[in-house]
Amino acid sequence: MHINLHKHRDDPQLCLSGTHFKRTGLVYGDNLIIRYQYGFIRMSKLPGDGVKLVNSHLVGQWLADSGFLPDEVLTVASEPGLITCKLQENGRGRTAELVRFARENKLKLLQVQRVNYSRSFILYFDIPASSLEKAGFSPDDTLLATYEHGLIKLQKPDFVGLGF
């Protein structure tokens, strides 16, 4: 392989494509974890479907694919080492009930937001700082999100378990 310079930038560029990926079992849309240090780069595919690396700002189409649509309400539960985000069906219609439920169970209530971007919209929500602190995370931590319809679990990645 050869490191190139992009015409309008001074930063080196490494580009991999085609048969290199095919031979390793990687396909379009795979999530990768990358470790780099001076003169060394190592990549590994994240295990399973429904797994992403995120931070405290959850954003992207994967939220909609998991049922987290604009204006939907979710609860956020925190415990040491784990944050669980659970979609609440008809949340806007059950506001009083959900507020009481959240208070009794020490949960946070959030609403999925959307921002217009380039003639479309992007979904997002932010994990509150108090929820991060209760789980032992900081806002700039890299977190492993495992998700399915209506449920997102956030944990710190086990880098040794992922081969790093």
Image: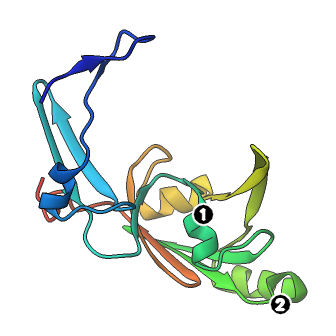
Which residue is painted at 62% across and 57% down in the image?
A: 128
Residue receiving disc 1: 61
Residue 126, image x, y percentages: 63, 56
Q: In this view, does 61 lie above or below 67?
A: above
Q: Residue at x 11, y 59 (%)?
A: 163
Query: In the image, residue 46 lies at what x, y percent?
Result: 27, 64
Image marks 1 and 2: residues in contact by CB distance under 8 Å:
no
Q: In this view, does 65 lie to the left or right of 147?
A: right
Look at label 2 and name its amino acid.
Answer: Glu
For marks 1 and 2, the one nearer the N-term is: 1
Is the N terminus in the top left, top right, bottom left or bottom right quadrant?
A: top left
- Residue 70 location, quadrant: bottom right
Residue 121 is labelled as none
Which of the two residues, 60 or 105, is positioned nearer the viewer here?
Answer: 60
Q: Residue at x 39, y 61 (%)?
A: 29
Amino acid tagged 1: Gln
Q: Residue at x 75, y 43 (%)?
A: 118
Q: Is residue 10 visible?
A: yes
Q: Which dot, 1 or 2, sits closer to the camera?
A: 1
- What whole-number distance in Å separates the C-alpha atoms at marks 1 and 2? 29 Å
Say the numbered circle drawn on residue 97.
2
Q: How crowded is mark 2: few (under 14 residues within 10 Å), some or many (20 or more)?
A: few
Report whether residue 80 is seen: no
Secondary structure at badge 2 equals: helix
Specify the quadrant of the image occupied by residue 100. bottom right
Q: Is residue 43 above or below residue 154?
A: above
x and y, in percent, of residue 31 in the image: 34, 59
